[in-house]
Image (cartoon, helix red, strand yellow):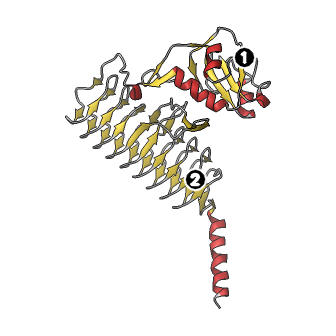
Amino acid sequence: MPDSRFFATKQPMSLTGAADAIGAAGTSLGQNQIVCVAAPMEADLQGAVVYCEDQTTATLLAKQNYGLCLTTAALADKVGVGPTLTIASPKLGFAILSAALHVSREDAKLEPDDAAQINEMAEIHSSAVISAGAVIGADVRIGPNCYIGYGVMIGDGSRIGAGVTITHAILGKNIHILSGAQIGQAGFGFVGGEAGPMRVPQLGRVIIGDHVEIGANTTIDRGALGDTVIGEGTKIDNLIQIGHNVQIGRYCILAAQVGIAGSCVIGDGVMLGGKVGLVDHLNIGDNAQLAAGTGLMHDVPSGEVWAGRPGRPIKDWLREIAILKRLIKKKNG
């Protein structure tokens, strides 16, 4: 269920009301209620809406007690015995119900009940804005023109440079964020609808471990349902884009202009050179390295070094370059 520090949950809906909302009017599901949306791998799906568009998710849901599942006709008999709606686009239906059940406090300006808690040892510039419910630790320094959103937590000893915006995020201790970084904005999530692309509500958080450094003008999007996570000790250069639900391990190094699409999982000790680009849902093993400019479209095993566009093991890439040079030299006589 979305974190109540960052998201407000609206009134529950009956199953029949949910069917009406997504254009499945006339479907009788009874008067049980749904109270939230959730990812299928969450431990407690009681009263939660989930969606299923593949066999892997169907297998997972077959063992769960969910509130309502939106799925396709091909998977309807494989998702378990709970209430199920078969619709053409389960993800679109899920987006509609997500917006009906939850709202970002930040977007709707719904302040939490708690006032901000600011440690007396923190140093905050007079032009910075600290929102309700935020928790600012000891020896934190926040520079001019920063915005710290509702419910954000910043651990002891952290340094926040000028013009930084942080929302929907929990930060550990001794984090250094350089000027202009944007943390916790909505990820780039859309689904096709009759009126064009519809935004899928982004209901997750950003979790940043201790001793992380984040460069100037870098953006880290919050998760769609789960969290975007940056592991302890990782160092992130300037002008980097990290998409929603990305998981980055401990002590990684990311050079400038890296772009990581949503739901990639990056292990511990990984090194990404400048302008590396990753498509979504990739896995990079521990201590792997990607040379500058690599365009990655496949998983990388632990400890391997890859290069090129598209990315492949660096020995293969170097061999191909050498062959091309010989062919060009031979052609030119």
Quadrant of the image for the C terminus?
A: bottom right
Tags 1 and 2 touching, CB below 8 Å: no
Q: Which residue is mark 2?
A: 288
Residue found at the very far front of the displayed protein: 195
Q: Which residue is mark 1?
A: 82
Closest to the observer: 294 or 266?
A: 294
Q: Which mark is residue 291?
A: none
> How far apart are labels 1 and 2 at the CA level?
42 Å
Label 2, residues with CA under 10 Å away: few <14, some 14-19, many ≥20:
many
Residue 284: percent from left, percent from top: 60, 48
Farthest residue, direction bottom: 333
**Location of residue 76 in the rendering, given as x and y in whole percent from the top left corner:** 77, 25
SS at circle 2: loop
Position above or below: 80 against 173: above
Q: Quadrant of the N terminus?
A: top right
**Does residue 314 sit above or below 217 in this rendering?**
below
Q: Is residue 106 above or below residue 324?
A: above
Residue 309 at x, y percent in the picture: 60, 62
Residue kind at label 2, given as amino acid type: Ala
* Residue kind at label 1, given as amino acid type: Gly
| Residue displayed at 66% across by 66% down | 316
Residue drawn at x 22%, y 26% as measured from the top left: 120
The tag earlier along the polypeptide, 1 or 2, is: 1
Other-residue count near label 1 (Cα within 10 Å), few / some / many at <14 / 14–19 / ≥20: some
Q: Nearer the viewer, residue 111 or 197?
A: 197
Find residue 26 and report its horizontal and vertical position in percent: 70, 16
